[in-house]
């Protein structure tokens, strides 16, 4: 009998995942990850992990499976939280959920599961795993979940073949309403529970305040760049090669204070991200101000009016050579090769037509239509049909 360790998070998805595996004849063990100790940064007085671990325990009892809690808060701090501060300090915007899956759930957690003699690790993600043969060897696929509203394959875009080999996603074939219905029939305590918000596992954390504890506030100016600014009508140079053109298209505009006018002050450029419009506290503009660039070195934020402002859009992005990741290693591009894909630069974004170009200088993702708020530090993921085949950090 194959043994599966399920990451029981105290939510409805992982509860039903555990139930389905038991029905399929696996020996199931429930494991709850405690990843956070510092209650000083959670918003409400409720202690989310305590409530969640309690719910996970009740689900395990109801399903009649063994249950234990593992404390991964040290690894979580080191691999996720410290990394996030680092990125924010550099003016980049990290994605903790993608990292949490790569570094914690399918690495640290998986190693614990395997040490308990598990054959597989299962989670309540809305995605599916496929298997095909390439040159006679099995290759695993990461496929979109059947519920188009909930497809979470993007969050797993950094997994490797090694990790996928041991992974199971029992609810990938179901929709959220079906999952809730199963939980309701089983009378599980999590059946009606709302989906968790906030950082994966930390509970309800106010990110800017959380960061402010570590990153010192420093006052700086907010500039507004006019949509008609001549910076947007510069002549496009002649390119000697496709690579040169892609480098040009993926390079962000460098704004200077003299390109715009001061419209307000902020408490630190490192708290803000491209495309953000809340938290600027600047009034009196005809349309809302959106952040089009931040400069952490000179502590300046550049904004533009309205979500169609030219400063928000770019056609091409670059991934550094060391940050290109292929789930399907057999599809990896060699220098000079290209591939038509569908790509997204954030969770829940509709897939966009794009072409990948691999050069020595990096991988370029060139979109058919310019994309809004391409943000450094976030992940771009690319698909062929409903299979997510690779991803990378936007540079």
Image (cartoon, rainbow, N blue to C red):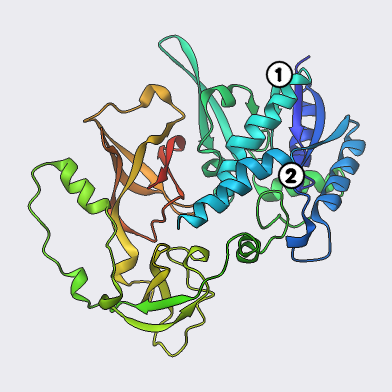
Q: Position of residue 48 (x, y in %)?
A: 80, 55
Residue 168 bears which disc, if any?
none
Location of residue 336 in the rendering, given as x and y in whole percent from the top left corner: 21, 30
| Depicted 145 relative to depicted 257: above or below | above
Image spot of residue 268 (x, y percent): 50, 69
Marks 1 and 2 sit apart, C-alpha to C-alpha, by 24 Å
Q: Residue at x 37, y 78 (%)?
A: 223
**Numbered disc 1: secondary structure:** loop
Q: In the image, which disc is placed on residue 35?
A: 2
- Mark 2: few/some/many CA within 10 Å (<14, 14-19, 20+): many
Which residue appears at 68% of the width and 28% of the height? 110
Total residue callouts: 2
Q: Check disc 2 and report its element: helix, strand or loop.
A: loop
Q: Earlier in the sequence, mark 1 or mark 2?
A: 2
Residue annotated with mark 1: 119
Mark 1 is surrounded, within 10 Å at the Cα level, by few (under 14), some (14 to 19) or many (20 or more) other residues, namely: some
Left or right, residue 204 beside residue 98 = right
Viewer-side residue, 126 vs 234: 234
Can you see residue 108?
yes
Which residue is depicted at the point 56% across and 69% down? Answer: 217
In the image, residue 193 above or below residue 323: below
Please say if the residues under marks 1 and 2 sit with CB atoms less than 8 Å apart.
no
Residue at the image position 61 percent from the left and 45 percent from the top = 80
Figure quadrant of the N terminus: top right
Q: Nearer the viewer, mark 1 or mark 2?
A: 2
The quarter of the displayed image where residue 162 is located: top right
């Amino acid at each position: 009998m194959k043994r599966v360790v399920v990451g029981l998070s105290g939510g409805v998805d992982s509860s039903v995942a555990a139930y389905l595996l038991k029905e399929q004849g696996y020996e199931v063990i429930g494991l709850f990850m405690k990843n956070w100790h510092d209650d000083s940064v959670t918003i409400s007085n409720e202690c989310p992990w305590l409530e969640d671990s309690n719910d996970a325990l009740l689900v395990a009892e109801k399903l009649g499976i063994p249950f234990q809690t593992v404390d991964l808060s040290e690894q979580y701090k080191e691999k996720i939280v410290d990394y996030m501060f680092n990125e924010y300090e550099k003016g980049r915007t990290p994605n903790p959920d993608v990292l949490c899956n790569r570094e914690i759930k399918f690495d640290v957690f998986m190693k614990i599961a395997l040490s308990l003699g598990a054959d597989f690790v299962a989670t309540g993600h809305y995605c599916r795993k496929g298997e095909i043969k390439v040159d006679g060897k099995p290759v695993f696929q990461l496929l979109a979940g059947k519920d188009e509203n909930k497809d979470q394959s993007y969050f797993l875009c950094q997994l490797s073949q090694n990790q996928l080999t041991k992974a199971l996603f029992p609810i990938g074939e179901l929709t959220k309403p079906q999952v809730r219905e199963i939980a309701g029939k089983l009378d599980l305590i999590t059946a009606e529970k709302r989906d968790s918000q906030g950082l994966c596992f930390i509970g309800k954390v106010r990110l800017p305040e959380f960061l402010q504890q570590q990153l010192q506030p420093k006052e700086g100016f907010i500039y507004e760049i006019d949509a008609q600014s001549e910076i947007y009508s510069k002549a496009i140079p002649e390119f000697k090669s496709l690579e040169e053109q892609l480098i040009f298209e993926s390079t962000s505009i460098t704004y200077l204070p003299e390109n715009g006018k001061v419209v307000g002050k902020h408490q630190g450029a490192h708290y803000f991200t491209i495309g953000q419009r809340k938290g600027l506290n600047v009034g009196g503009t005809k349309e809302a101000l959106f952040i089009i660039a931040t400069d952490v070195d000179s502590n300046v934020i550049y904004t533009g009016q309205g979500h169609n402002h030219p400063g928000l859009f770019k056609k091409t992005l670059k991934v550094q050579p060391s940050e290109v990741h292929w789930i399907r290693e057999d599809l990896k591009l060699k220098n000079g090769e290209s591939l038509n894909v569908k790509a997204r630069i954030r969770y829940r974004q509709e897939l966009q037509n794009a072409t990948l170009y691999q050069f020595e200088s990096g991988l370029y993702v060139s979109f058919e239509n310019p994309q809004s708020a391409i943000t450094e530090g976030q992940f771009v993921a690319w698909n062929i049909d409903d299979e997510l085949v690779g991803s990378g950090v936007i540079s």
